[in-house]
Amino acid sequence: MTENIHVGAASFLPLIIGAVIWIAGPVLTAVLWKIRKKEPVATILIGAATFLLFALILEKPIQNVLAFPTAMGLPDHAVSRFLNANPVLLALAAGLFPGVFEETGRLIAFRTVLKKRGNRETAISYGVGHGCFEVVLILGLTYLQYIVYAVMINTGVFGTVIDQVASAAPEQLGSVETVVNTITGFSFGDVGIAFVERIFAVLFHVGASILVFFACRDKKRFWLYPAAIVLHTGMDFIGALSIFHVINLSAWALEGICAAFALLTFFGAYFLCYRKDVGKGS
């Protein structure tokens, strides 16, 4: 499969530049925010750790057990069959899980380890940690992995991997082929789309963090917590509808919708909560 495939400079260069952007960019953002506002680095790290715990360690396995058990080597069951037979409901579940888990993670963090951090900058520090760590994990490490694969393809080593997959798990060959096609066809356009998507994703996470922070600080505004869940679920629901081919959207159209959710969340939280809190921050 890879004998006549070569990853050229036109694909290699954007992979390398993308990897630098997705690793150095988030780190630089967190450092500059910490320096400018003299915020404790622990708050940023708590945002990152909470995302890791609630989104990856808790949410993803539970979601996969309910909706995609066979992908985890588990037997199929009634719930997964029902969801997969109804792609709209499957998309709703795909949106609801991150909405509930990630926003609840914020809530628990603000009410426990960050309980004594009452200044409004804490909300942004947490959001920066959450959003920037997600960028490094989802894009930075993925691009690094793609670079390693590209080197393996060009040196002929990747063929050995194909043979191992073919003998051990032939049903995974389609996924491997998809990865190869992604790498060999990679372009600066892909980096551009990812850049736009991640900018708005970080804005969303900062905005959602502000909403949940003020929901914890003021009982009368606790409704901001379920509002954050609804906004998060809605954004991911639209993306899942596209992934499961319920709706047909171009990459840029989908990014436009996500951008609308991110801007609504961020500026809504900023003007509704953060800006009105002038004088109460650090």
Image (tube, helix red, strand yellow):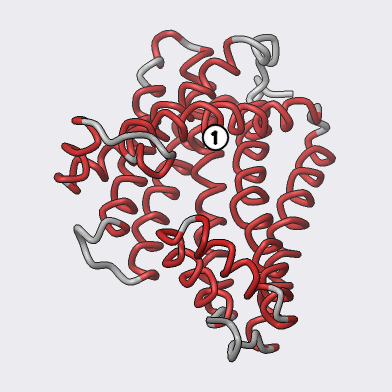
Q: Is residue 203 above or below residue 193?
A: above
Q: Is residue 31 above or below residue 66?
A: below
**In this rendering, position of residue 281 left or right of residue 236:** right
Along the line of sight, the residue nearer the viewer: 22 or 59: 59
Residue 32 in the image, given as x and y percentages of width and height: 80, 46
**In this rendering, position of residue 22 left or right of residue 28:** left
Residue 135 in the image, given as x and y percentages of width and height: 62, 51
Residue at image position (35%, 46%) is: 235
Along the line of sight, the residue nearer the viewer: 250 or 117: 250
Q: Quadrant of the C terminus?
A: top right
Residue with the mark numbered 1: 56
What is the secondary structure assignment of the residue under circle 1?
helix
Q: Is residue 169 above or below residue 152?
A: above
Q: Is residue 171 above or below residue 264?
A: below
Circle 1: residue type: Leu
Residue at image position (21%, 44%) is: 84
